[in-house]
Image (cartoon, rainbow, N blue to C red):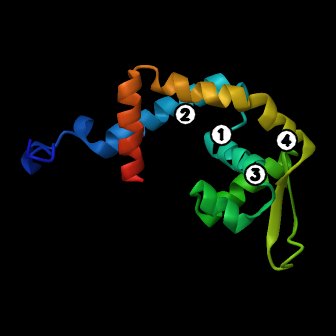
């Protein structure tokens, strides 16, 4: 290993690569989310959209995508699936008819309120193997990588 924790190029090992470890950690976090949230049709990305709309109120599709760090195609797909489930609705933006505004429906609002405690539990379960000090360091390091 060099000073940055990288193996020499002739000794590449996938298991120690950061992208591989982040992908595995993401898989674990997603599995915990699905197990804890109690809705097999709700993905972590869809939850991000619902929770953001709950906290921010109605947003344009572009604003929602920016706040949740989704590309436009992903944002559109997430919104379409949430519309199909009756959790959000789209309508022309009253200030700019060229834009589409997205907001929670009553059913979507109720879902977020009902599951927000479970979503917080996902955070705790995901970080469970770490001590409180390790959690602080880990979340700080993740923030630097973002």
User: Which residue occupies the foreground of this view, 67 or 80?
Assistant: 67
Residues tagged 1 and 4 counted as in contact (Cβ below 8 A): no
Residue 1: x %, y % from top left: 9, 41
Which of the two residues, 126 or 82, is positioned nearer the viewer here?
126
Q: Single out the mark in the foreground, 1 or 3.
A: 3
Residue 24, visible in the rendered structure = no
Q: Where is residue 103, by image quadrant?
A: bottom right
**Label placed on residue 53:** 3
Taking the image as shown, residue 25 lies to the left or right of residue 54, namely left
Q: Residues within 10 Å of mark 2 (few under 14, many from 20)?
A: some
Image height of 31 relative to 45, above or below: above
Residue 109, numbered label = 4
Q: Position of residue 67 (x, y in %)?
A: 62, 58
Location of residue 52 in the rendering, given as x and y in whole percent from the top left corner: 70, 50
Residue 32 visible at all: yes
Q: In the drawing, what numbered circle is on residue 145?
A: none
Q: Earlier in the sequence, mark 2 or mark 3?
A: 2
Location of mark 1 (residue): 43
The residue that appears at 7% across and 47% down in the rendered structure is 10
Badge 2 vs badge 1, beta-carbon distance below 8 Å: yes
């Amino acid at each position: 290993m060099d000073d940055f924790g990288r193996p020499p190029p002739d000794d590449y090992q996938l298991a120690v690569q950061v992208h591989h470890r982040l992908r595995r950690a993401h898989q674990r976090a997603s599995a915990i989310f699905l197990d804890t949230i109690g809705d097999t049709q709700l993905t972590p990305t869809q939850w991000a959209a619902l929770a953001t709309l709950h906290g921010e109120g109605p947003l344009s599709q572009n604003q929602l995508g920016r706040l949740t760090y989704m590309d436009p195609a992903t944002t559109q797909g997430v919104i379409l699936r949430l519309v199909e489930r009756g959790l959000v609705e789209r309508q022309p933006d009253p200030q700019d008819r060229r834009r589409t505004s997205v907001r929670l429906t009553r059913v979507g609002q109720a879902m977020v309120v009902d599951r927000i405690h479970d979503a917080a539990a996902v955070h705790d379960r995901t970080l469970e193997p770490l001590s409180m000090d390790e959690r602080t360091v880990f979340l700080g390091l993740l923030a630097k990588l973002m």
